[in-house]
Image: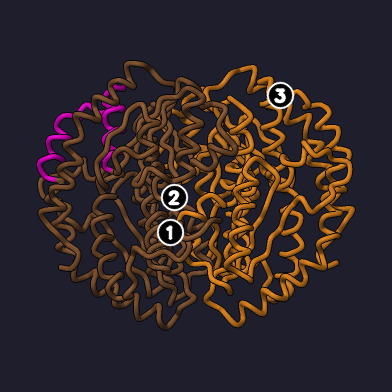
Chain colours: A brown, B orange
Amino acid sequence: MIKFEEQKQIDNVKGALMLRSQIEKAVDKIQKEGFDGIYFMGIGGTWASGMQVEVYMRGKSAIPVYVENAAEFITTGNKRFTDKSVVIFSSVTGNTVEMIDAVKKAKEIGAKVFGFIDVENSFLAKLCDICISYPMNEQLKFFMVANRLMYHNGEFPEYDEYNLEMEKFLPQALVEVEKEVDQWAADYAKEKYRYCKEHPDMPHYFIGAGNHWGATYSYAMCYWEEQLWIRTKSITSAEFFHGMLEIIEAETPVTLFIGEDEQRPLSERVASFLSKVCKNYTVIDTKDYKLEGIRPEFRSSISHLVMHAVNNRVDAHMEDEFKHPMVIRRYYRQFDY
Amino acid sequence: MIKFEEQKQIDNVKGALMLRSQIEKAVDKIQKEGFDGIYFMGIGGTWASGMQVEVYMRGKSAIPVYVENAAEFITTGNKRFTDKSVVIFSSVTGNTVEMIDAVKKAKEIGAKVFGFIDVENSFLAKLCDICISYPMNEQLKFFMVANRLMYHNGEFPEYDEYNLEMEKFLPQALVEVEKEVDQWAADYAKEKYRYCKEHPDMPHYFIGAGNHWGATYSYAMCYWEEQLWIRTKSITSAEFFHGMLEIIEAETPVTLFIGEDEQRPLSERVASFLSKVCKNYTVIDTKDYKLEGIRPEFRSSISHLVMHAVNNRVDAHMEDEFKHPMVIRRYYRQFDY
């Protein structure tokens, strides 16, 4: 398998799960000091991860949790954001300009800032009240914060057994998904290469819902558009039926992500519709993966990680098929704009 | 001018502005009875209008105002939504299935429901605690609600003079925009027809920010995709720089909407970037329109209506150029799905 290091990936997820004691300490401090709102703040992919954790909590928790886009926070602002508010963010480099300005503004207002920054000692890290440095696993980190917040609010009684189960089984379960899906992903990438060469202008459509939506949006934009330079459009399963459906024809290329949270029926409805009008669509349903050791009722909270594991394999093969190294950028950070 | 009836359009906007006494009565009642949250609820275009009013209020008002997508409310729900919450929505037909289910759920929880429904005596109208029936002007109605809420909260001291000015000048100012832009819109539509025939697969990119974003999203999806069957992708000006920029080349077709609210600089940044990498882009800047009688500081609250007026002319000419009646649907409400 190309670009796959089983033990390293297992260790990486294990390490992220082992952040739990640090995350609990941070959340417990936030809880103890009180807050009027938790703002997951980001831009691009990190904003999308914020959307994932917000919708994860929305139906389960009465805690005031919001998603803020850093660039909107800098310009429009938010009059409900106060010195009792808490910003939670994640940043790989710690030097995204919108994030620096947004965090500065939050600090000026007097809010508390809790950052996950991959790179230690970045400028952004110095602005944080609490900072945890560990590479990757952004969504997992956010969901761990969410789980602790809900635990404190009496909304997650299974918290301890949940964590023991994840710590024991999740790292292996995710690499098993990658191994199982690898050949399928290779075929998918080959087919996409063929299709794109024949239809260079055609966007590829991605559809998803619930805690998969942020990932669907950022997968389309931050992977295919930004890293592979392939046109995409993404839409939520619910919104699909209020406009976008009309441009789907038999040959339109669509990938539908079906997760396992409360919004699953919205995506199932899209699958049913697509089967009637399209023959160039792919369904990736996280329910198809076993996830050894993880009980059914806990799957909805991690099905987006299963999708991420599938897409890891897709990315590896897309990069290879298209002969397009995913690290190169046409414009981003190449010149001033 | 095709599909343009000056006096009828003036009267229609005047009539909407004259709803003020009814809207004030409704909002005053909501205010008096108290609430823990105002939820603008919708799906598709009506959800997008909710996004517009939420961001309009976000920087100015401490009132807890949220946007809820009806389909997500039915499935995921919202644990912060209570019997002290208020739903505000707009519906043309009053029979959109997701809206009916969402309003039913809100009523079961015990919330108050305030609907604007174009069609009187629809099923949805019967579920409302307060219902105002008047055709079109959805965004204007929502903003009138917002203005009254902010007035009560001490956040809109110029409320009275603002309304007098709008009632006196807005209806005429908007038709003047349409008259001024008509020839330009005819040329734009002709060029789009030519381009689409040569590049049938290529999506048209729409970019916008702030209180124009919801309109940008719904214009792309509910007009070009749904009513004209033309591929589009829409993105916010802020998010554009975090992925989508990479697929812009010299010939990529882009339309950028620049409004006049706090997020204007985000869109100006896109304009500056586009000028360096693209030569097939169009900027529609609401600042180019005079809006006789309306003072500069009030323009940001209505610049999305100016953009709407421009797009009215674009739509009229697109329908004519493409010989595609905008009322026809391939799938929507044509069969069960």
Report x, y in % for residue B324. Answer: 67, 73
Q: Amino acid at mark 2?
A: Gly
Magenta residue check for A149: yes
For the question of whether residue A36 can be seen, the reply is yes
Q: Chain of mark 2?
A: A
Q: Chain of mark 1?
A: A
Find the distance from the CA under tag 1 to the CA under tag 2: 8 Å
Answer left or right for B265 relative to B75. right
Answer left or right for B134 relative to A145. right
Mark 1 or mark 2, which has the lower sequence index?
A: 2
Label 3: few (<14), some (14–19) or many (≥20) C-alpha neighbours in 10 Å: some
Question: In the displayed structure, would residue A96 be above or below residue A318?
Answer: above
Q: Which mark is residue B11?
A: none
Answer left or right for B144 relative to A143. right
**Circles 1, 2 touching at the beta carbon (< 8 Å):** yes
Residue at left 18%, top 46%? Answer: A13
Label 1: few (<14), some (14–19) or many (≥20) C-alpha neighbours in 10 Å: many
Front tag of 3 and 2: 2
Question: In the displayed structure, would residue B84 be above or below residue A166?
Answer: above
Report x, y in % for residue A276. Answer: 41, 70
Residue under label 3, please give it: B151
Q: Provide the residue span drawn in magenta.
A: A140-169
Q: Chain of mark 3?
A: B
Q: Amino acid at mark 3?
A: Tyr
Label 2: few (<14), some (14–19) or many (≥20) C-alpha neighbours in 10 Å: many
Residue under label 2, please give it: A44
Answer left or right for B224 relative to A305. right
For the question of whether residue A158 can be seen, the reply is no
Residue at disc 2, secondary structure = loop
Residue at disc 1, secondary structure = helix
Residue under label 1, please give it: A221
